[in-house]
Image (tube, rainbow, N blue to C red):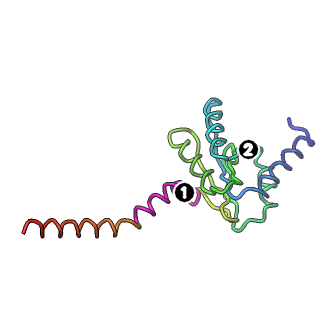
Amino acid sequence: MITKEKKGEILKALQDIVKKAKTIVFVNFHGLPVNETVSLRKILTREKVGYKVAKKTLIKRALEAGKYEGSMPPLDGEIGLAYSEASDLLAPAREVFNFGKDKSLQIVGGVFEGKFLDAAGMLGIAAIPPIKILYGQLVSLLSSPYRSLVVALNQIALSKEKS
């Protein structure tokens, strides 16, 4: 049993997370073995993503103080919060999703850009690739017309050499 003082400390920590975090992912970790939880925490730490487990009533109280748009999705099961204060807003959802693909871990909702999102909304965000991959795709997309022009000019030059 947790004392009132301890609950107060946990609530204060959760309120601090809610105030500072740019993205929060609600994670149902029911049935996740301890060794996999440790692995998840290591992965999240490497990506500068925090992870906090608390009672749902305390999580709900902290989130109510956050004044987010929309309605809070149902927090079913045992809930942990993956959150990020860093510049990569997609990292919490992406890393939890990637880790939980073949494990008993699922995203049940979250907060993104000041709005509550359900599981489907957070899974959509999790599917967005990291920023470095997006930059690479953009460069490839922008260079594609030039590459096609160079290939066409090369073919014209080759055909003129033959004739």
Residue sitting at the far left: 163
Residue bearing the label numbered 1: 131
Where 79 falls versus 90 (above or below)?
A: above
* Magenta span of residues: 120-141
Residue 19 or residue 34, whichever sits in front: 19
Residue 147 or residue 105, whichever sits in front: 147
Q: Residue 88 — which label? A: none
Q: Residue 158 in the image: x percent, y percent? A: 15, 65
Is residue 52 highlighted in magenta?
Answer: no
Q: Look at label 2 and name its amino acid.
A: Lys
Q: Nearer the viewer, mark 1 or mark 2?
A: 1
Magenta-drawn stretch, dominant element (helix, strand or loop):
helix
How many neighbours does mark 1 have within 10 angstroms: few (below 14), some (14-19), or many (20 or more)? few
Q: Residue 153 in the image: x percent, y percent? A: 23, 70
The mark tally for this picture is 2
Q: Look at label 1 and name its amino acid.
A: Ile
Left or right: where does residue 5 sit relative to residue 38? right
Q: Residue 100 in the image: x percent, y percent? A: 55, 42
Where 15 falls versus 7 (above or below)?
A: below
Residue at 63% across, 57% down: 89
Residue 154 or residue 87, whichever sits in front: 154
Is residue 129 highlighted in magenta?
Answer: yes
Residue 6 or residue 154, whichever sits in front: 154
Question: Residue 155: which quarter of the image?
Answer: bottom left
Q: Residue 68 in the image: x percent, y percent? A: 74, 65
Query: CA gap, disc 1 to disc 2?
Result: 25 Å
Q: Secondary structure at mark 1?
A: helix
Left or right: where does residue 9 sit relative to residue 28? right
Left or right: where does residue 16 sit relative to residue 112? right
Residue bearing the label numbered 2: 52
Is tag 1's residue or tag 2's residue first in the polypeptide sequence?
Answer: 2
